[in-house]
Image (cartoon, helix red, strand yellow):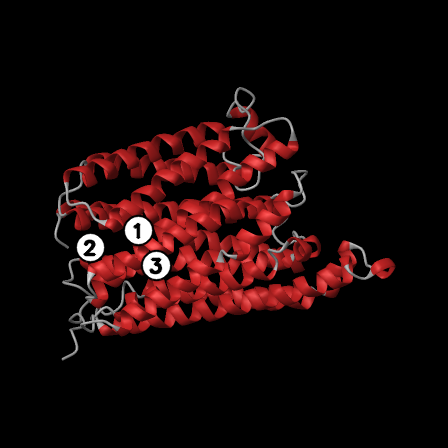
Amino acid sequence: MKYTSQMVAKPYFIAAIALFVGQILFGVIMGMQYVVGDFLFPEIPFNVARMVHTNLLIVWLLFGFMGAAYYMVPDEAETELHSPLLAKVMFWIFLAAGVVTILGYLLVPYATLAEITMNDLLPTMGREFLEQPTIIKIGIVVVALAFLYNIGMTILKGRKTVINLVLMIGLVGLAAFFLFAFYNPDNIVLDKLFWWFVVHLWVEGVWELILGSLLAYVLIKTTGVDREVIEKWLYVIIAMALITGLIGTGHHFFWIGTPGYWQWWGSIFSAMEPIPFFMMTIFAFNMVNKRRRQHPNQAAVLWALGCSVMAFLGAGVWGFMHTLSFVNYYTHGSQITAAHGHMAFYGAYVMIVLAIISYAMPMLNGRKVANSMKAQVVEMWSFWLMTISMVFVTLFLTAAGILQVYLQRMNGDASLPFMVVQDKIEIFYWMREGAGIIFLIGLIVYVASFFVGRDQPEAEMPK
């Protein structure tokens, strides 16, 4: 670690992992509620558990992105962070807002929460993933603007690199598209149209730029491949991600009352969305094969390679499976959507945040470049436990979705009611719950890896 101000990344990373554990706990609770309907009812109803699960996902990933930027940007810019104090203050504000929001979901009926936060003055609540009270959304905007100012000023005063440029474009896009969360038209078609401007253009647009820049940074640091080579790949990948991701938003517009041409635009461009993820996979493995050195932090390299593969499978392959309009007509909103969502988020964003934490945390904890081999072995166990269990979560949900679509939507007059179908595919929900528990165990092992082998010397460069 070259610059003392990079230390501000550490609390962001710790908060991210703590919130990640909370997210998975509520995921396991929801999985149980699928098969035991009154599990923890009325203390934690399903709709509340789902709100907490999805909101924690978004918040902890944002903590991870911010921590990654605070660590990476000074290193890339070769200068200290513009204002470490501002970063620390915004950390506590963002953490307090996140915790208060989650506690509000759990302890106060949602309608009451809307009333006490004066949602009627500027109504923004009640929409999936954007359930946060308006006052919290305003707080998120303040934190995002302060963060962008801090990162932007650091980049302006230091060395300009492609990685920092791509990261900054992604972060500005993240902040800009979140502003659509404040637009809540009465017309439900318009509402859903612009709602996707946040949800889709985050995860299938500007977040991909953040993913690409973080992956490129980790690969430069761990492989020793020339920066110019990696930057050329990065340009091509983010260009394809933006072109396909922006127009590919149309695959969400098929059935909400928008003009019919979106079925063509949405189908064609979203069918091309796997291309940048496939390129990312080729890029990552190519860089590792061309490496000039064996980096001692093999756990970080494993996370980086795993991220590229799982992102391609989850976002690319599983996304393509049901993105064409004539397929989506039957699969829309089924468990196939859930299968795609779980693997895509894990592969593209969870794993890249874990990769940058895996790379940076040893140095933030005072190591030279890597943890001990004992700690890395434990961390690699967590990688395989979480990754394999997520593959099975996805496969079980896919099987449930295929049966659901056939029995409920494609069987003509013999099609069965929704709840009857849910009973028939219950076995897959039980298996999904089992895989989810193993994922939680893998996450606990990941946390434990930071506490083992502390008294042992760090891994060294292979001779």
Q: Secondary structure at mark 2?
A: helix
- Mark 1–mark 2 Cα distance, whole angstroms, equals 10 Å
Q: Please name the residue that numbered disc 2 is placed on.
A: 364
Q: Is residue 446 visible?
A: yes
Where, by quadrant of the figure, is residue 158 drawn? top left
Residue 457 in the figure: left or right of residue 123: left
Q: Secondary structure at mark 3?
A: helix
As drawn, which residue projects farthest toward the right?
Answer: 413
Comparing labels 2 and 3, the label whose residue is closer to the camera: 3
Number of residues whose C-alpha sits closer than 10 Å to that of mark 2, classed few (under 14), some (14–19) or many (20 or more): some
Q: Which mark is residue 354?
A: 3
Q: Secondary structure at mark 1?
A: helix
Q: Measured from the top left, where is residue 221 in percent x and y?
A: 21, 62
Rendered residue at 46%/63% (across/down): 312
Image quarter hosting the N terminus: bottom left
Q: Amino acid at mark 3?
A: Leu
- Mark 2–mark 3 Cα distance, whole angstroms, equals 15 Å
Q: Nearer the viewer, residue 157 or 85?
A: 157
Residue 326 in the figure: left or right of residue 357: right
Image quarter hosting the C terminus: bottom left
**Is 22 drawn above or below residue 390 in the view shown?**
above
As drawn, which residue projects farthest toward the top?
Answer: 121
Q: Are marks 1 and 2 in contact (CB under 8 Å)?
A: yes
Q: Amino acid at mark 2?
A: Leu
Q: Amino acid at mark 1?
A: Phe
Comparing labels 3 and 1, the label whose residue is closer to the camera: 3
Rendered residue at 71%/65% (across/down): 403
The numbered mark, 3 or 1, whose residue comes first in the sequence reads 1
Q: Measured from the top left, where is residue 25 in percent x and y?
A: 49, 55
Q: Are marks 2 and 3 in contact (CB under 8 Å)?
A: no
Q: Please name the residue that numbered disc 1 is placed on.
A: 13
Rendered residue at 19%/50% (across/down): 76
